[in-house]
Amino acid sequence: MADPITAVESLLLPVMEAVAGRAGVDPVVRPSEHADAQINAALGVAKQLGRPPREVAQEILDQIAASPACQGVFASLEIAGPGFINLVFSDEFLVSSLREIAVDPRLGVTPVASARRVVIDYSAPNVAKEMHVGHLRTTVIGDALARMLRFMGHEVILENHVGDWGTPFGMLIEHLIDLGEDQVAAELSLGDLDGFYKQARNKFDGSDEFQDRSRHRVVLLQSGDAETTRLWKLLVGLSTKHFNTVYDALGVLLTDDDLAGESMYQPLMGHVITRLATAGLLNESEGADVVFVPGFTNREGDPLPLIVQKGAGGFNYATSDLACVIDRVERLGADLMLYVVGAPQQQHLSMVFAVAELAGWLSPPVEAVHVSFGSVLGPDRKMLKSRSGDPMKFADLLTEAASRAGDAVAAKNPDLGAEQRSEIARAVGIGAVKYSDLSTDRVRDYVFDWDRMLSFDGNTAPYLQYAHARICSIFRRSQAADGSGEISLAEIQQLALTTPQERALALGLLAYPSALADTLSTYSPHKLCTYLFSLSQLFTSFYEHCPVLNAPAEVRSSRLVICDLTARTLSHGLGLLGIDTPEQM
């Protein structure tokens, strides 16, 4: 069952076709401040027919009145302004729609008719470096999109494109040898990846002898030397343990099976160059192999090249990213690739996609989309840093989130036991961090503010989680009173809308499918957040004006159904964002 606006659009399509005298006329039904919805198509049809818009609008009303499919759907229809038609749905239509979603595990959301194979590239930490706050947005945005796309029926392949290759690994492996494997394993197991990296870098910058060893080690690594490869795998394995610790704490989908390091694409690098040359796209520029991409110029207006092979024969990120396109399209069979990567990489990715199109590797129906995002800022509106001045470590951020949430939960409900408070604090703290990020339009920067994100008021995860917990408390009290905590079919049949608050909440509940579709149409999780916050506000108004447990029996049953639907929708929507919903707070 679609939401009312989508359902009404379907009902009105033959009406509009009859008035316009042609097929495929979109009624253009949209939400309205003046009614439940509004038909906006009359003006366009009138212009095409050369008739007055209000005259056409009246003919649409006459056709609706004569349509058997539209009977009982509308409480009122009214022409407004130059030719808009305001629609008010009948309570019977809304109740019937609510009954359908009340027995639907998917809450009215229909899977897509044509599923796609989607590769999502997100998170992408670097081996031998700790994850920091700069990895927050890519990880939580990518994870939320993966959950939503899977729910809609798409086949989703996660790719964590970790940085596990390149010249720094020469110095890292040599530093490992100097310290000894056991010591390194002990240190890195404690999570001090940054310290290890800085020690190696300082040694490299201060010793010519160490530099020579490091460069030789890179050659050995690239040539497949067995011992060097073993040591490299040791570093990768220790780093992966750190990544998994962060992912477990954050509650995201990524596992070792999703790792797709830069090393994975090294065998394809030469293949990329060969195929570009065969396609006649390679040019020489200042000793390097490049592709000149139409439409891209530098500040002087000269053609801007994408360098794919350096003068010394080395490959770079562009080569690796082109290899990724080939692999994802030709091996994985992807027809949609989402790159959840920061906005500063916009030009680079646009040029990579353009070259892939020129080479014939990326052509319809296959799409590559850069899901860009802004930065997480500190109070000074600069990149968020720790007290030491370094980027805040991801693990430290999550630990602090749970700690701060524990204080907030204890203040809200001091009667909770220690174990229960700890579990709720984790859900609230991690949820607050995720929601603060996801509720911001991804293309914008935002200021990281503990007090705001952990507040139980406003557009925050704790506010939504508390609304869900409040509904759960209603059912606990209902069960204590009559032994029943489940919604029955008989109660669903008693659904009725007797107050403005119930009706408004019903409209909000029925809008869930459209909210999810709108979110995925632009890969913008903040749209789902906005919907869930609005739904929570509608429930708060309902809760304040409509007694549930103290209402007469039939009204009580009806309102319990509405409460159940609200709790399920909040829990489901937050779950698609990767946020838990405790039953008690």
Image (cartoon, grey):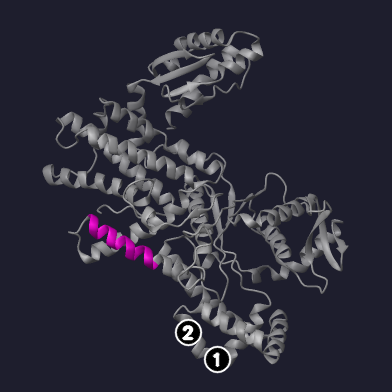
Residue 21 visible in this rendered orientation of the protein: no
At x 42% / y 66%, what residue is drawn? 397
Nearest to the observer: residue 216 or residue 575: 216
Neighbor class of circle 2 (other Cα within 10 Å; few <14, some 14-19, many 20+) is some
Magenta stretch in the rendered image: 399-412
Which sits in the foreground, 411 or 416?
411
Residue 141 among magenta residues: no
Mark 1: amino acid? Leu
Q: Quadrant of the C terminus?
A: bottom left
Return the x and y of residue 296 as percentages of the image width and height: 78, 51
Reading the image, the residue beneath label 2 is 187
Residue on which disc 1 sits:
179
Position above or below: 237 against 537? below
The reply to whether the C-beta atoms of the residues labelled 1 and 2 are less than 8 Å apart is yes
Going from N to C along the chain, the mark reached first, 1 or 2, is: 1
Residue 69 percent location from the top left of the image: 44, 17
